[in-house]
Amino acid sequence: MSAAPLLAVEGISKSFRGLRAVSATSLSVPEGGIVSLIGPNGAGKTTCFNMIAGVFRPDEGSITFAGRRIDGLRPDLICRAGIGRTFQIVKPFKELSALDNVIVGALRAEADVRRARKKAEAVLDRLGMLDKRDQPAAQLTLPERKRLEVARALATEPKLLLLDEVMAGLRPTETDQMVAVFRDLNRQGVTILLIEHVMRAVMALSQQVVVLHYGEVIAAGAPEQVVRDPAVLECYLGEEADI
Amino acid sequence: MIARLTDGVPRRALILLGLLLAALLVAPLVVDAYVLSILILILYFAYTGQAWNVMMGFAGQLSLGHSLYVGVAAYTAAALYVHFGLGPWAGVWLAILISMAFGLVIGFLAFRFGIGGVYFALLTIAFAEFTRVGFDHFTWVNGSGGFFLPVTQSEDNDPFNLRGDPVMFYYLLLAITALAFLLCRWLLTGRIGYYWLAIREEPEAAQTLGINVFRCKMIAVAISAGMTALSGVFFAFYYNNLFPEQIFSMSRSIELILGPIIGGVGSLFGPILGAFVLTVLAETVTELMHALGYDIPGIKQVFYGICLGAVVLYLPNGIWPPLRKRLGLGDRS
């Protein structure tokens, strides 16, 4: 990697009442890349995301996006800087229709509601949800809500997309569809950082995998390499795991 | 810009709205003074409910102290008229500005320091209450003794100073209510409307989508307070007397929000329907009891309580959303 990465996280830490959730974690995402963040439950992955997305200010360390320090910025400013995110525990606007949910995202870059609606329809179509456009988000199934999260974030036209376990609960064929969507987006220039437990998706998508355990990076590298790393096998997949 | 007012609205909804407006326009020609006073009351609650709905129904911020904005604006316009001879058409602007300033102060305190939900509602009550106490001792407007506007005996209507008969007030209020309805429709179908609904539903997700939550809430409070100010000015010139005890009272705040709650919080037509249903039913009950020889003080309040309970139990979204579905009208009208 010669050029500066799009996202550079350097030595960030975060403690909650003495519990060190994330400890001196560094990772970088090259422009146009797809990087996965994996690790057992409670490893600090979502805390990392929350620091990048501006929910928490890191206790120490720095986060640089497109050459600009963004740690400590408010979430709405981070979104405007070009980072879109989804929530692991989905947060749809329940009373609004699926289309209106996505329009809210599309209005970030497009002030005109009619044009934002066109754009939102295109995004829904791309995620295969156009037939659900008029359904209130409250009536969608969980996998649909996860896709709606993605659609909403995508509609803000991010340069970097943070995906927090969007494949969870999907059937293998649905996972493959989502993988295809993300590959397609990536080809069009969207850089992706994802937290994922579904190894099928991680292996298929990632150019690089970072493994977190107890808030620290224990391995990083190409997916095939990482899953053979003894430390990873022991801590994350268990000793008898077999990929 | 203007076209979005009717975007996605079924033709039937437009026709029904047109018919309603026509009926309200000709009403003063056919009804007697008593019915006209009821119609004024209905429009008054419809308009004020609409204003409150901007904050609660759209942006999800519960205010239980809207009497503050009514009162402050009423006193401002009345004092300017009595002390400086400045007519309501000029005074109303200052009244709106002062009401907005009050709203913005409350909003700033609450939203900057993360006070939400019930605690925000308590803050709005607190502000209304201590403003009431303040006005009780505000001798420039005669404190708790009440402030009175001069009533002229002239036969002619004087629309420039809002001196005249109820018919003039009725048409003024009808125009204001109709404009408020259009304004709310315009706001709701615009970017700010989408942002408000997003904040109401899920503030954290809204912020993640690039929405400046603080600013959007402040805009909602300013618009709601400014609109409510207009009903305060109307109140002052229609009733000609102002008492802090009454105008700033908690029960007044509650009375203002019953219409939208019963009609349907967050809907555009809900506050209008709610005001209509509630006022007509309450007047009917009072008249009925009177005719039967029972003059029970507070019967209206008891009746409001029953209506509110029934709506909360059986129609938690208010009576308009289910009715709208049955009539086959648009989704957000």
Image (cartoon, rainbow, N blue to C red):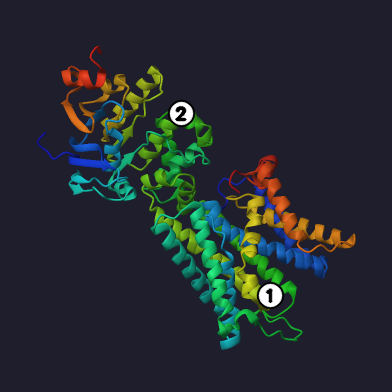
Judge left or right: residue A168 versus residue B98. Answer: left
Q: Is residue B324 shown to the viewer in this render?
A: no
Q: Chain of mark 2?
A: A
Q: Quadrant of residue B177?
A: bottom right
Q: Residue B13 location, x and y as percent?
A: 66, 48
Position of A128 relative to B83 (above/below): above
- Determine the secondary structure under disc 1: helix
| Residue type, numbered disc 2 | Leu
What chain does badge 1 belong to? B
Q: Residue at x 78, y 64 (%)?
A: B297
The number of discs equals 2
- Residue at the image position 48 percent from the left and 64 percent from the top: B222
Type of amino acid under label 1:
Tyr
Residue named by callout 2: A142
Q: Nearer the viewer, residue B11 or A83?
A: A83
Percent x, y of residue B256: 64, 61
Depth check, front residue: B144 or A139: B144
Of B2 and B258, nearer the camera is B258
Compared to residue B287, the image places residue A70 above or below, namely: above
Q: Residue B11: tell me if it is visible.
A: yes
Is B198 left or right of A47, judged from the image as shown?
Answer: right
Give the residue number, with chain letter if any, for mark 1: B238
Q: Position of residue B160 (x, y in %)?
A: 63, 81
